[in-house]
Amino acid sequence: MIRNSLVAGVILVALAYFYDRKTTDTSLDVDGTGISVEEATLNAWESTITKPSVPITKIAIGLNVNADLIVSGTALLKALKINPKNKHDHSTLHDLTHLGETFGYFFSKGAGGERYFSNGEVYKQIIDVADKIPDKQYSLGGNAGLMAQKIANTLPNVQIRFIGPVGPIAGKLFSKTINIPSGVMVEKDEVHLIMEYAKGEKWGEDVAPVATRFITSNDIANANLARLDMFVKSVIEFKPQMIVLSGLHLLDGHPQETRTRLLKMMRNEIIKMPRKVPIHLELASMANADCLAEIAQQIFPFIHSIGLNEQELVFFSQANHGPHQDLKPVNGYPEIAAVGDIVSWLLGKYSGGSSKLARVHFHSLTYHLIATKMDTWQNSASAVAAGARVAGEQACMTKPIQPSKVDLLIPKAFSLSVDNIQLRQQVVIYDPARPVTLWNRDGVDFAFSPVLVCRKPGNTVGLGDAISATGLLYSMYSIETK
């Protein structure tokens, strides 16, 4: 029996290697059609993606919003006279040395990161220098603000009410179709610094493996959940079909006592919201394991859905003693089977009983995965494909996606689990004519789709928010469940 299992395992590995080598060339002729796997995937998405039978027409979104100041990360560090020396991931930034070391850490890995800058005076000096860089750009920022903007631009007929500390710069950048109550406006924007870099760009001895960005801020209003007191009142008045929340990652820099107080405030406000209206929480990069664990304990049982990327998922597993805590991207993607295991564990740990949590939308550079408890959310195949498609559209800044400008970077053969024996023995051979892979594990439905990765992205900011927003628009919650 052991020998047979070993032989089967060797065959599966060899089969995966063969198919991966066979389809590495993206100009591969698919079924004799003369088209690439990218074009075939795009064509199949068109027939796969269907809108839910009950479309969403009203959404309430909050709380974090700011003005993003976007600059070249390496250009800013040079202007600040910071040299590429040591690389170290500081959980909180206190000075210019911390900024240079933490940027270098994420740059070398090609991973997007976000860290709080604790020294307001030094941060203001950095912003003053960044504001003088010739190619700088201001853009709407904040996960909640970006999700509202994406929905408004995608479906202008959807009614959106946004609640958060909206300053004068952000106010001008918001779509005119978004309803912003006058009482939420503030005199001064919180400014977040977006330090972008391109694939192949050099910083010291390192070469960036992918194009992405590092974010830092000294955000006071959003970190204190400003306008939370107005959110529930506005939601009840507005009567939305869905509620989207974000900004809890900004509690990362608070002392535990302050953080606990703010999370209890958030939980108490969530409890007041209409029970049959699904609530989605979008997470973002964090460095404080205790904060993330406390968010899960205090907030997860009272929301219906979460969105997160590979850094947040792995850190979540580390903070809560989950599986595959040492998972790292290989060749640009986190192992699909291991991600499936962590998502399955997450839902198993935090759903069930009185908990409302029943959906996880995982997004990474190369693929997305939506997992839902059976009979709670519908249309996940369309939702994961639509989210994957919008990632390429927004990164390349072209609609529709041009096949010649994107690459399929997932392994062409992969298993569905590391820990589950039955799923581990299944090798999925990627078929571009069927770009969404579906499976069930312990009462959880999984939907997987690759992303067509833009070769020369024109935009790296807000991709996760656009992905999650799009996935929600194509999902449908079964209100009879809880």
Image (tube, rainbow, N blue to C red):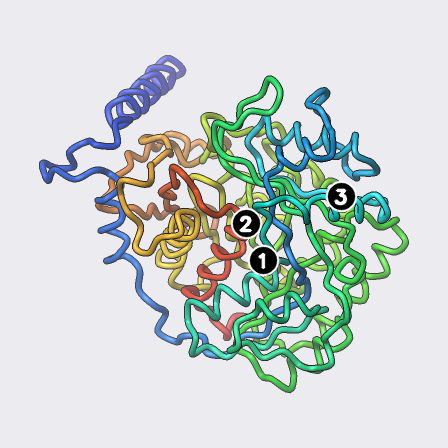
Q: Nearer the viewer, mark 2 or mark 1?
A: 1
Could one spot residue 322 in this view of the protein? Answer: no
Answer left or right for 432 relative to 369: left
Q: Is residue 355 above or below residue 215?
A: below
Which one is earlier in the sequence, the residue at label 1 or at label 3?
3
Could one spot residue 220 in this view of the protein? Answer: yes
Q: Secondary structure at mark 3?
A: helix
Contact, mark 2 vs mark 1 (Cβ under 8 Å): yes
Q: Position of residue 15 (x, y in %)?
A: 28, 22
Residue sitting nearer the eye, 380 or 206: 206
Answer left or right for 195 relative to 155: right
Residue sitting nearer the eye, 120 or 151: 120
Which residue is tagged 2? 461
Which residue is tagged 3? 126
How far apart are labels 2 and 1 at the CA level? 9 Å
Contact, mark 2 vs mark 3 (Cβ under 8 Å): no
Q: Position of residue 393 (x, y in %)?
A: 38, 52
Q: Quadrant of residue 148?
A: bottom right
Which residue is tagged 1? 139
How far apart are labels 2 and 3 at the CA level? 20 Å
Q: Quadrant of residue 31?
A: top left
- Label 2 is placed on what type of residue? Val
Which one is earlier in the sequence, the residue at label 2 or at label 1?
1
Q: Determine crowd level at label 3: few under 14, some 14-19, many 20+ residues with C-alpha closer than 10 A.
A: some
- Label 1 is placed on what type of residue? Ser
Question: Residue, x 60% and y 48% (percent of image)?
Answer: 136
